[in-house]
Image: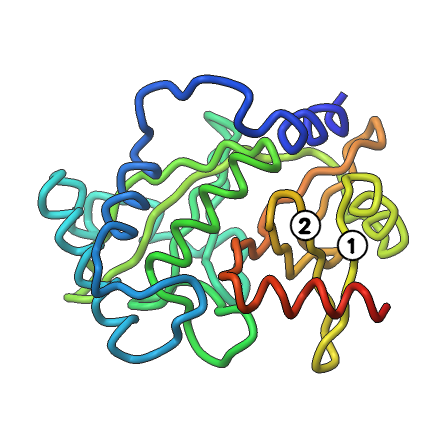
Amino acid sequence: MGNERQKRSISSQGDHESNAPSTLESAESYVAASTAAGKQGDGSRSAFSASFAALLNWGEATGLTRPEGEFSFLRRKPTAYGDEHQAWFDEGNNRWHKATYPNRFGIAWSREGSATAGEYLTRLLLQNQYFGDDIHLMALANCDKKLRVITSQPHIIGEHAAYEEIQRWFRGLGFNRFESGGSFAWYRTDYNLLVSDAHEGNVIRSPTGALFAIDLNLLMPNQETRELFISLLDII
């Protein structure tokens, strides 16, 4: 059932009408509309700063920038943590609360350092749209004058999928694998969708055998990068 849900999310994209925008959609749209915030893949300092400023403006305009004291879980030891987030499990609603590290927005693709705020928000939105996730943007936390993005997402019961399972799954979803610089990623040409970080820790196998992606790094490349991916696919 879960696997079918994943395939429907990918295959039906664009075939339904949108409801009122979610908080995540509102934030992503606001930052994307900032002409100074740069485009996907722009790792310049100016693009990072402008994207950061646009997210701050959105938080102030919507009243969703909150002091860290309003988030009781931030005072507890994290249930889990990784390179991009700390996470706390909420048994009451069976969801994970996640917080980015201060003034960072996850790992950038193909370059060192943090992604921009816009890249991070787009990544979360694509995860919902194409992989059937339910990531919510809860708020922006002001932590000693540093910003942390607070999100939540459903808990998936299961265990980490095996490498071979993940490879078969992505191919079954219509993705092609390519390798560059010692790392690999997945690309689906008809949606211009790039997926990286699809390792065993980010794909869960449910008790029924269905696979669920929980923390991928997704983007929609610009034309120049898209042409590069297609050329790499032709070689492999």
Q: Position of residue 26 (x, y in %)?
A: 27, 37
Say above or below: 114 vs 136: below
* 124 with respect to 233 (left or right): left
Residue pictured at 76% horizontal, 37% vertical:
211
| Residue 212 falls in image quadrant | top right
For residue 133, side relative to residue 163 (left or right): left
Image point 84% across, 52% down: which residue? 167
| Circle 1: residue type | Asn
Q: How many numbered marks are there?
A: 2
Residue 44 picture location, percent across and down: 34, 79
Kindly indicate whether the residue at mark 2 contacts the one at mark 1 (C-beta within 8 angstroms): yes
Q: In the picture, which quadrant includes the C terminus?
A: bottom right
The residue where tag 1 is placed is 176
Which label's residue is closer to the chain start, 1 or 2? 1
Instruction: Tell me the quadrant of the picture where the N terminus can be found.
Output: top right
Please, is residue 73 above or below residue 128 in the view?
A: below
Residue depicted at 24% across the width and 61% down the height:
147
What residue would you read off at disc 2?
Answer: 189
Q: Which residue is pictured at 67% across the width and 52% down the height?
A: 202
- Secondary structure at badge 1 equals strand
